[in-house]
Amino acid sequence: MAKIGKQIAALPMRWKKDGTFQVLMVTSRDTGRWIMPKGWTMDGKKPWTAAEIEALEEAGAVGYIGHEVVGQYTYRKKLGKGVSMICEVDVYPMVVEKLKSNWKERKERKRKWFSAKSAAKRVSEPKLADLLRTLAKKPSKQPVIREFLKAS
């Protein structure tokens, strides 16, 4: 059986002044498809801290990250030379306070705000699309997000 990789992701989100809920997506470096900022867990760091670092490096997003997983999805990560592995990704909610104009991977990725419904149509991972569609309905009614919003 293939080894399963564990990854973490931030789900950067905001509510506009008119109450519209949006999520921030970035393009992957290899294929340019829309994804959430994600990466490997980091030694000595809590998983949500690692997700917060990925959001800063990949999207230039700064804000508050939740400590509870809001969802999980899997995808096949290409490692090169026809080799790939299955990765299981834990998703942590993040309320974005600001976007930096100068961030680590700005020359390698694009970033863009989408409605959750629109983001769901752009991702290739079915479970991630399901999570985004769930958020499109009533994001602040999701138990993890509701608790997180009360705390932040």
Image (cartoon, helix red, strand yellow):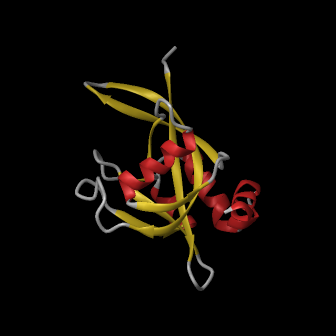
Q: Nearer the viewer, residue 5 or 77?
A: 5
- Determine the residue positioned at 46% across, 34% down: 42
Q: Is residue 116 above or below residue 39?
A: below
Say how many tags the image has: 0
Q: Tell me residue 59's x, y (percent).
A: 38, 58
- Determine the residue positioned at 47% across, 63% down: 24
Give the farthest residue toward the bottom: 18
- Determine the residue positioned at 63% across, 66% down: 136
Residue 47 at least partly seen:
yes
* Image side of residue 108 versus residue 78, left or right: left
Give the farthest residue toward the left: 107
* Image side of residue 61 versus residue 83, left or right: right
Q: Is residue 49 above or below residue 141?
A: above
Q: Nearer the viewer, residue 45 or 37?
A: 45
* Image side of residue 142 versus residue 33, left or right: right
Q: Hey, which quadrant is residue 34 in on the image?
A: bottom left
Q: Hey, which quadrant is residue 16 in on the image?
A: bottom right
Q: Hey, which quadrant is residue 69 in on the image?
A: top right
Q: Tell me residue 89's x, y (percent).
A: 54, 39
Give the farthest residue toward the front: 44
Q: Tell me residue 63's x, y (percent).
A: 52, 62
Q: Nearer the viewer, residue 82 or 65?
A: 65
Residue 37 at least partly seen:
no
Give the farthest residue toward the top: 1
Which quarter of the rendered picture does the C terminus lie within?
Answer: bottom right
- Determine the residue positioned at 77% across, 56% down: 143
Q: Tell me residue 57's x, y (percent).
A: 36, 52
